């Protein structure tokens, strides 16, 4: 409604929030340790760092040094000369942070999310990256924290004229990954799983083609890898080859990479989408 307003009435702790008299709890701290009881949250919606895509702490130094001039006497957080970066969960080789550091940090945060979520709760976050290692880090963090990907939705996230991607071969789509607590799994052969991935990816790309002027090869890569994570994680750890050997996360990621790379220059068939919108847009 035009006259509708969203009003936040702040409380000081979770107990005050739970009694229903007010509706917002705001705090600044690490997502690795939330001051929230077990199984008390319906949904966690977040936007984690995309591996080494953006170094947020380094960028914030530009603003921090000027804010520090005015605030260092009033707030101890503004005592250091620059923003603290030791605990930032990113991949940054110059700081000695590799993919394993990034993955371990995500695992700690996702594990904390699982603790506070009710059993039917959702963990929802966006992700894209052009490197398979980053996708592998995210997948292992999800699985190790006790989640699986129940759906992966491709969503246009960048305007074509955005300064940082204009006239570059950049990714404009995010995969919105919807995760649930993994309480069990069903057995699947890799051959069956690969067919399912191909089918879901084709339907998603066909639907996007019907509504967009075109998808770059990297956008198709994001869509296919999102579907790979969705299909594999649903059956993990019961994914097997024909000889009965289990398909490990490492092996699955390598196979997913080959599948996704196979779609880079592929064009979806021409024609209208019929009967596929539910799979792409609802889950």
Image: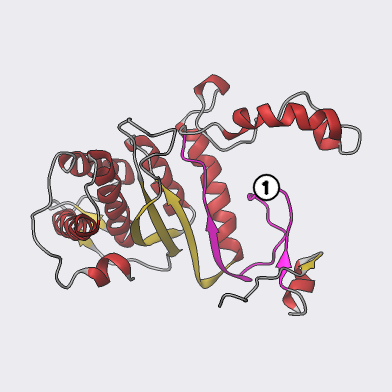
Identify the residue at horizontal 85%, vertical 35% (top origin).
71
Q: Which residue is mark 1?
A: 30
Q: From the top left corner, tell me how far across and down residue 29 is, in percent.
A: 71, 48
Seen in the image, is 173 located left or right of residue 20? left
Provide the major secondary structure of the magenta segment.
Answer: loop
Helix, strand or loop for disc 1: loop
Kindly give the residue lying farthest to the left in the view shown.
270
Instruction: In this rendered view, identify the residue nearer to me: 184 or 149.
Output: 149
- Considering depth in this image, is 167 or 140 the residue closer to the camera? 167
Give the residue at x 57% y 75%. Answer: 2
- Percent x, y of residue 245: 21, 50
Q: Is residue 84 visible?
A: no
Q: Does residue 116 sit above or below 105 in this rendering?
A: below
Q: Position of residue 160 (x, y in %)?
A: 35, 42
Q: Residues within 10 Å of mark 1 (few under 14, many from 20)?
A: few
Span of residues in magenta: 23-51
Q: Is residue 201 magenta?
A: no
């Amino acid at each position: 409604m035009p006259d509708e307003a969203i009003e936040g009435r702040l409380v000081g702790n979770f107990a005050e929030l739970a009694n229903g008299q007010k509706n917002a709890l705001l705090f600044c701290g690490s997502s690795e340790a939330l001051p929230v009881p077990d199984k008390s949250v319906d949904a966690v919606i977040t936007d984690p760092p995309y591996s080494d895509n953006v170094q947020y702490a380094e960028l914030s130094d530009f603003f921090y040094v000027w804010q520090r001039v005015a605030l260092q006497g009033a707030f101890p957080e503004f005592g250091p000369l620059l923003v603290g970066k030791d605990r930032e969960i990113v991949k940054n080789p110059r700081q000695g942070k590799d993919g394993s550091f990034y993955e371990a940090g995500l695992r700690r945060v996702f594990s904390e999310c699982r603790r506070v979520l009710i059993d039917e709760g959702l963990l929802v976050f966006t992700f894209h990256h052009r490197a398979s290692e980053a996708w592998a880090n995210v997948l292992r963090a999800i699985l190790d924290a006790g989640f699986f990907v129940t759906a992966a939705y491709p969503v246009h996230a960048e305007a074509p004229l955005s300064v940082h991607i204009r006239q570059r071969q950049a990714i404009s789509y995010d995969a919105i990954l919807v995760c649930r607590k993994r309480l069990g799994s069903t057995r699947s052969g890799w051959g069956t799983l690969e067919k399912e991935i191909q089918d879901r990816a084709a339907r998603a790309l066909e639907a996007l083609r019907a509504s967009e002027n075109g998808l770059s090869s990297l956008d198709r890569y994001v869509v296919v890898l999102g579907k790979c994570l969705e299909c594999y994680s649903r059956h993990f750890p019961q994914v097997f080859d024909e000889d009965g050997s289990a398909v490990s996360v490492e092996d699955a990621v390598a196979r997913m990479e080959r599948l996704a790379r196979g779609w880079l220059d592929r064009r979806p068939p021409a024609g209208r989408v019929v009967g596929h919108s539910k799979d792409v847009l609802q889950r």
